[in-house]
Image (cartoon, rainbow, N blue to C red):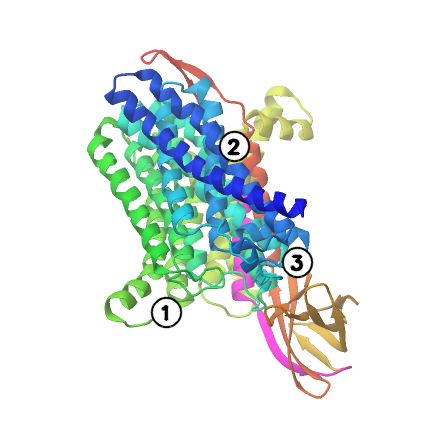
């Protein structure tokens, strides 16, 4: 009885702390405004202290919800709706973000964490501007706490409590979905930090050379988390949903892809402002737009206007609130940009159309056009339905037709860009450096045409460009190693290591580009050369798909704590390995799911799905042979390793004579 009372009181404590966090966030947002109008500069420091308090209070609220899930406290309505006593402890914790209310609470909890870290870092590096940065984030927290506490409250109680919960969505009872949403949220919310810096810079006329270097790492961290979330989402969809693919241009997939596109443009464009004091307006536009698209992703998923495996059906009031909040953020931020942007003028101009800074501008244009194309394809059906009642679907044919050519040009820029110097290029030197990579690319495209089955023109074109980019990356690195060996007389292994460690920022970026090339090859192989077959099989039957022979050996039945399973058993005769696809039924929700079996090597996946039994001792089996899928996941790991290397580069400090303050680069 005492334990039950403690559990009930802990939830109430968490609920109370969430309201206190809302009030403290409001103080955090108001403090610099009050300091300005009351002419009391010391009041602004309340924002700094509030950033610590709001994180502590939000954490108490979050931990009380986690405790409610772990202890199966079904007096909490949200716990009863998304958990039950049979759910493994791992998924009980993850159930916090398994529904609408908890996922929003996780969003704001992560925002308070970022705010805390910014406050801790800013006390030393940018104390004069820190209160306004924290105030911007404080107003964002106020907006989300308003939604959570008054429309989507995860602390809502119900008495009497039910004896058993409803269970977590079976599709979410998977390790991929434990880590995928927090990864996306860390990316979404991470872009609030560059947003707060940009708003502060516009409001206070903070010189760009003093603040742009500060947001580079924040933007890279947010981009890294968002990249991780997108890749984990594709990985989960691939092995969990049983359709043989990993990306369907689902509107909610697009919701995470759009800020990734503009975030990618941002992390490139910041380099130009950092190195050449230009593209100021571009960067502020990209910062505002990237964060706004992060809010749009929240609106699309949480408003209930989409029908998706990712989306939650909720009442229109919540969607209207999120839409209004997003509109306010867009209106205020772009209004400040239009009014104050003239004070963030570029100090230099592009002197040659064939220069690295010029290619960065084209990079920004291409990523912005790509994002706008995805935005159009995602929102047009919703707008048409809202205004005319007509229902249409914009699917893969549109997105592939628009996006593939754009990405081919982006890969070309990625290959050539690092070889083009700042300001102006030496055409003869560039021609010599591109010659052999160009030959490799043409040879690769020709090999696809000659030796592989006829495919769409994008197959040889994309393969050729990917190998062209790969060859440029390798050649650039080898040139640097050879130059170091000539100067330092080092062994090749030491020279390679020292070359990379001597310029971590540059070679971290090159490794990221290498990962992109690997992913591109995986997309080409799995997208253009996939084979599939749907067959009815009984014990002893053998089928061959794309050279892979499989024998059906029968089925087995299993009972687990919260589901029953029928497992098919097939032997891959080429390798002797066993494939064990499953069909599961979760009794609490009467929800059947498929669990694929994937036999994976670097060159191909044999992907097997067990469908329904269609006659006595016969089962429908769907078999896919997907070439190079592992390249996609491997490329993602390579991207993250390059990002870590780039972030590990030591910060260079220089003193700006005019400002009289240290600048972190």
Q: Which quadrant of the figure has residue 33?
A: top left
- Which of these two is toward me, 495 or 314? 314
At 57% from the left and 43% from the top, the residue drawn is 9
The residue positioned 35% from the left and 43% from the top of the image is: 364
Image-based side of 517 in relation to 199, left or right: right
| Distance (Cα) linking label 1 and label 2 | 45 Å
The answer to whether residue 246 is above or below residue 27 is below
Tag 2: Cα neighbours inside 10 Å, few (<14), some, or many (≥20)? some
- Residues in magenta, as a range: 513-540
Classify residue 26 by image quadrant.
top left
Q: Which image quarter holds the C terminus?
A: top left
Label 3–label 2 contact, CB within 8 A: no
Task: Find disc 1 in the rendering and name its residue.
Answer: 393
x then y, percent, for residue 214: 42, 26
Reading the image, the residue beneath label 2 is 56
Is residue 348 visible to us here?
no
State the CA–CA distance, disc 3 to disc 2.
29 Å
Choose between 260 and 431: the one closer to the eye.
260
For label 3, the SS is loop
Mark-to-mark CA distance, 1 and 3: 36 Å
Q: Nearer the viewer, mark 1 or mark 3?
A: 3
Residue identifier under label 3: 87
Work out whether mark 1 precedes mark 2 in sequence or the reverse, and give the earlier one: 2
Q: Residue furthest front?
A: 1
**Horizontal arrangement in the rendering, residue 321 relative to residue 524 (left or right):** left
Q: Secondary structure at mark 2?
A: helix
| Mark sitting earlier along the chain (1/3) | 3
Front-most of residues 318 and 223: 318
Check the image and name the residue furthest to the right. 576
Q: Residue 151 placed where, x, y %?
A: 39, 51
Residue 73 in percent (x, y) is at 60, 52
Residue name at image x 32 percent, y 24 percent: 32
């Amino acid at each position: 009885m005492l334990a039950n009372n403690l559990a009930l009181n802990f939830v109430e404590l968490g609920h109370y702390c969430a309201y206190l966090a809302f009030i403290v966030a409001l103080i955090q947002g108001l403090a610099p405004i009050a300091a300005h109008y009351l002419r009391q500069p010391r009041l602004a420091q309340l924002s700094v202290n509030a950033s610590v308090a709001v994180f502590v209070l939000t954490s108490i609220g979050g931990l009380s919800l986690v405790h409610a899930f772990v202890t199966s406290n079904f007096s909490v309505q949200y716990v009863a709706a998304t958990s039950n006593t049979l759910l493994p402890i791992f998924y009980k914790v993850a159930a916090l973000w398994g529904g609408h209310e908890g996922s929003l609470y996780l969003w704001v909890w992560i925002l308070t964490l970022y705010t805390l870290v910014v406050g801790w870092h800013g006390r030393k590096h940018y104390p004069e501007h820190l209160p306004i940065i924290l105030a911007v984030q404080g107003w964002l927290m106020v907006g989300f706490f308003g939604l959570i506490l008054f429309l989507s409250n995860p602390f809502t109680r119900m008495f009497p409590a039910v004896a058993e919960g409803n269970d977590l969505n079976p599709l979410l009872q998977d390790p991929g979905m434990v880590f995928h949403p927090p990864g996306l949220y860390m990316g979404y919310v991470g872009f609030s930090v560059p947003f707060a810096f940009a708003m502060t810079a516009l409001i206070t006329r903070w010189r760009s050379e003093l603040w742009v270097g500060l947001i580079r790492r924040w933007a890279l961290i947010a981009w890294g988390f968002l990249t991780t979330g997108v890749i984990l989402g594709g990985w989960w969809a691939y092995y969990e949903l049983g359709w043989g693919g990993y990306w369907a241009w689902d509107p909610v997939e697009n919701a995470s892809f759009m800020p990734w596109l503009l975030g990618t443009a941002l992390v490139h464009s910041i380099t130009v402002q950092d190195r050449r004091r230009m593209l100021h307006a571009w960067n502020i536009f990209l910062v505002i737009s990237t964060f706004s698209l992060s809010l749009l992703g929240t609106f699309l998923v949480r408003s209930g206007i989409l029908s998706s495996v990712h989306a939650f059906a909720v009442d229109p009031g919540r969607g209207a609130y999120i839409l209004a909040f997003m509109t306010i953020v867009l209106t205020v931020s772009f209004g400040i940009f239009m009014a104050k942007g003239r004070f963030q003028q570029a100090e230099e101009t592009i002197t040659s159309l064939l220069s690295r800074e010029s290619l960065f501008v084209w990079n920004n244009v291409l990523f912005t056009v790509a994002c706008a194309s995805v935005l159009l394809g995602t929102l047009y059906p919703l707008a048409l339905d809202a205004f005319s009642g007509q229902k249409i679907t914009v699917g893969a044919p549109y997105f592939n037709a628009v996006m593939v050519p754009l990405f081919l040009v982006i890969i070309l820029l990625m290959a050539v860009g690092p070889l083009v110097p700042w300001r102006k290029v030496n055409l003869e030197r560039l021609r010599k450096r591109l010659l052999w990579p160009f030959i490799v690319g043409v040879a690769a495209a020709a090999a696809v045409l000659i030796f592989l089955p006829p495919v769409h023109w994008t197959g040889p074109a994309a393969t050729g460009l990917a190998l062209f980019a790969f060859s440029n990356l390798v050649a650039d690195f080898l040139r640097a190693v050879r130059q170091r060996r000539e100067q330092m007389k080092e062994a090749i292994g030491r020279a390679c290591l020292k070359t990379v460690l001597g310029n971590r920022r540059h070679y971290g970026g090159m490794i990221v580009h290498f990962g992109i090339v690997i992913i591109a090859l995986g997309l080409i192989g799995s997208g253009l050369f996939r084979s599939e077959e749907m067959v009815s099989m009984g014990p002893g039957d053998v089928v061959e798909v794309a050279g892979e022979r499989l024998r059906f050996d029968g089925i087995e039945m299993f009972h687990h704590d919260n589901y029953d399973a029928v497992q098919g058993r097939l032997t891959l005769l080429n390798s002797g390995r066993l494939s064990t696809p499953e069909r599961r039924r979760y009794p609490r929700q009467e929800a059947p799911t498929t669990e694929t079996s994937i036999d994976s090597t670097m060159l191909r996946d044999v992907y097997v799905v067990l469908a329904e039994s269609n006659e006595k001792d016969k089962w429908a089996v769907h078999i896919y042979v997907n070439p190079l899928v592992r390249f996609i996941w491997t490329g993602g790991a390579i991207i993250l390793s390059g990002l870590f290397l780039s972030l590990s580069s030591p910060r260079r400090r220089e003193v700006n004579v005019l400002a009289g303050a240290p600048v972190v680069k």
